[in-house]
Image (cartoon, rainbow, N blue to C red):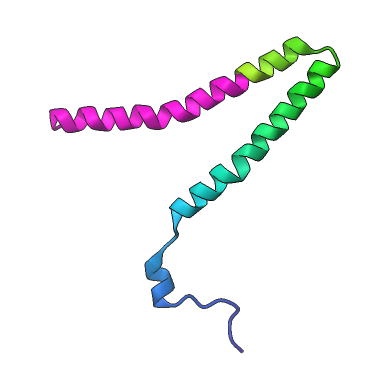
Amino acid sequence: MYPLSTPTAEVLAAGINADSIVTWSLATIIPLILLFVGISIMAGARRGDVSGGMNTTMVVLLGAIVIVGVPLFIAIARQVVGVFGA
């Protein structure tokens, strides 16, 4: 009996294509998350809970700033280390 999946040497050498995973998540998952957050904010505003919606918006924006800021900080740190040769 054959096993269900037997990776060949070529498949193992190829590795995982992380670029396509990142591209897919940016094109699919992130817009769905933003859609859900937007709908929940609008639903809260319809019930008269505008301040709660604004708090949620600020939390989402601050989270996005942190998520974008960390790789940016790491890139700047790598440039500084490269310049000073440490």
Instruction: Give me the residue at 79% from left, 16% from top.
Output: 45
Question: Count the marks: how many?
Answer: 0
Residue located farthest toward the bottom when viewing the structure as drawn: 1
State the quadrant of the N terminus. bottom right
Q: Main secondary structure of the magenta part?
A: helix
The relative height of residue 54 versus residue 60 in the rendered view (above or below) is above
Judging depth in this view, the residue of 38 and 68 nearest the camera is 38
The relative height of residue 78 versus residue 11 in the rendered view (above or below) is above
Bounds of the magenta segment? 59-86
Instruction: Give me the residue at 59% from left, 86% from top.
Output: 2
Judging depth in this view, the residue of 18 and 31 nearest the camera is 31
Locate residue 61, reporting x and y percent.
Answer: 57, 21
* Left or right: where 47 falls relative to 72: right
Task: Judge whether residue 72 is colored magenta.
Answer: yes
* Left or right: where 75 falls relative to 46: left
Instruction: Give me the residue at 48% from left, 54% from top.
Output: 20
Locate residue 81, reporting x and y percent.
Answer: 20, 30
State the quadrant of the C terminus. top left
Determine the image quadrant of residue 73. Answer: top left
The relative height of residue 71 versus residue 24 in the rendered view (above or below) is above
* Left or right: where 78 falls relative to 27: left
Locate residue 17, reporting x and y percent.
Answer: 44, 58
* Left or right: where 58 falls relative to 79: right
Residue located farthest toward the left when viewing the structure as drawn: 85
Instruction: Give me the residue at 43% from left, 72% from top.
Output: 11
Residue located farthest toward the right when viewing the structure as drawn: 47
